[in-house]
C-alpha cells in the first residue's frame, strides 16, 4: 500500500480566540482531514485571551508553539514553519489564516487540484469570499509588468488552474520541492509582504504558482485603507508609517527593492506623501 503523503498545517494566531476556534472547527470536521496524514502546528503569539488554552482543551492533538507576542503574522509563520520542518519530513504544507472559515470540500479540492498539476514544485492558491458581500476577498494576483510592483486581483476559474505571480497565504498549498528550492517564508518581514515575496520568488525561480479553481472558504478583507487619514496627528501618522500593521515602511521597501528596484524611490516618496499629505488620499481615494 502506498504511504499517505505527510501534510503539515501551519497557522499563526494572536488574541482572536473565537475566530481561531471557528477556523480549526472548519478544518478538522472535513472528511479529508479525517483520512489524511495531517499534523497541525499553531503559533500562538502571546495571546492574552486564552486562545492557546481553548485550543488545547478542544484539540489536544494540535501542537502549539508559544511566540514572544511581537512576532506578528509573517515572523510567526516563519517560526512555525521552521518548527514543523524540524519535527518531521513533510510532502505538503498547508498555510492558513486563522480568520478563514473553510468550505466543507476545501482540503479535498486543494489536494485533488494539486494532483491535477501532475508535477512537483508547486504553490497552489485558494481564493476566498467575503462573508458579507459574497465577493472575492483574497487569492492570487497578476503583475501588469514583471518590472513593476502594480498588480490586479485574479478571480478563480470554475475549472481551470490559472497561473499568477503573487498570492495570499490565507489558503495556500506548498509542496516539498518548492521548499527545497526556495526555502520557507523570509524572516525579513514582520507582518505583511512575506506571502507576496514567497510566491513571486517561486515564480521567478521557474516554479508553478497557480490559482486553484473555485473558492475554498470565507474570509473578510479587513485591511481597510492603506493610509492614516489627515484628521490624525502627524506623530500618529509617522508611527503608522513605520508600524508593522500600518504602512510597514522598512518591510515594504525591502520587498520593492528586492523585486522591483526601479520602483524603489517612487515607492518611498509615495509612503512619505501618504504620511505628510494624506489629504490627497482622503479626497481622491
Image: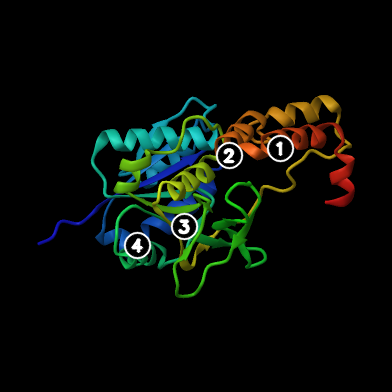
Residue at image point 77% right, 33% down: 269
Contact between labelled residues 2 and 4, with CB atoms less than 8 Å apart:
no
Label located before the other in sequence (1 or 2): 2
Q: Secondary structure at mark 1?
A: helix
**The disc label shown at residue 153, or none:** none
Residue 73 location (% of width, % of height): 53, 37
220 above or below 76? below
Mark 4, mark 1: which one is toward the viewer?
1
The residue identified by callout 3 is: 125
Residue at image point 50% right, 62% down: 217
The residue identified by callout 1 is: 267
Mark 1, mark 3: which one is toward the viewer?
1
The residue identified by callout 4 is: 114
The residue identified by callout 2 is: 192
Residue 219 in view, yes or no:
no
Contact between labelled residues 1 and 4, with CB atoms less than 8 Å apart:
no
Q: CA distance from mark 1 to mark 3?
A: 27 Å
Q: Quadrant of residue 131?
A: bottom right
Label located before the other in sequence (1 or 3): 3
Amino acid at each position: 500500500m502506498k504511504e499517505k503523503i505527510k501534510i503539515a498545517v501551519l497557522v499563526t494566531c494572536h488574541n482572536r480566540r473565537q475566530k481561531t476556534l471557528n477556523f480549526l472547527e472548519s478544518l478538522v470536521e472535513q472528511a479529508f482531514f479525517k483520512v489524511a496524514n495531517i499534523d497541525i502546528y499553531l503559533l500562538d503569539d502571546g495571546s492574552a485571551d486564552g486562545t492557546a488554552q481553548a485550543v488545547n482543551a478542544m484539540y489536544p492533538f494540535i501542537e502549539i508553539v508559544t511566540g514572544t507576542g511581537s512576532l506578528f503574522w509573517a515572523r510567526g509563520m516563519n517560526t512555525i514553519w521552521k518548527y514543523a520542518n524540524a519535527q518531521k519530513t513533510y510532502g505538503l504544507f498547508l498555510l492558513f489564516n486563522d480568520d478563514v472559515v473553510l468550505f466543507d470540500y476545501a482540503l479535498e479540492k486543494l489536494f485533488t487540484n494539486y494532483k491535477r498539476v501532475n508535477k512537483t514544485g508547486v504553490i497552489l492558491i485558494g481564493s476566498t469570499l467575503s462573508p458579507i458581500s459574497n465577493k472575492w476577498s483574497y487569492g492570487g494576483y497578476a503583475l501588469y509588468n514583471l518590472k513593476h510592483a502594480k498588480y490586479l486581483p485574479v478571480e478563480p476559474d470554475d475549472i481551470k488552474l490559472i497561473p499568477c505571480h503573487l498570492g495570499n497565504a490565507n489558503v495556500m498549498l506548498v509542496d516539498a520541492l518548492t521548499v527545497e528550492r526556495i526555502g520557507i517564508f523570509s524572516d525579513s518581514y514582520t507582518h505583511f509582504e512575506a506571502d507576496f515575496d514567497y510566491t513571486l520568488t517561486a515564480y521567478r525561480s521557474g516554479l508553478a504558482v497557480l490559482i486553484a479553481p473555485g473558492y475554498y472558504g470565507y474570509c473578510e478583507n479587513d485591511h481597510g485603507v492603506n493610509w492614516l487619514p489627515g484628521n490624525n496627528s502627524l506623530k500618529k501618522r509617522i508611527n503608522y508609517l513605520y508600524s508593522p500593521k500600518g504602512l510597514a515602511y522598512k518591510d515594504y521597501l525591502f520587498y520593492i527593492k528586492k523585486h522591483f528596484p526601479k520602483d524603489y524611490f517612487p515607492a518611498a516618496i509615495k509612503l512619505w506623501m501618504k504620511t505628510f499629505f494624506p489629504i490627497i488620499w482622503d479626497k481622491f481615494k
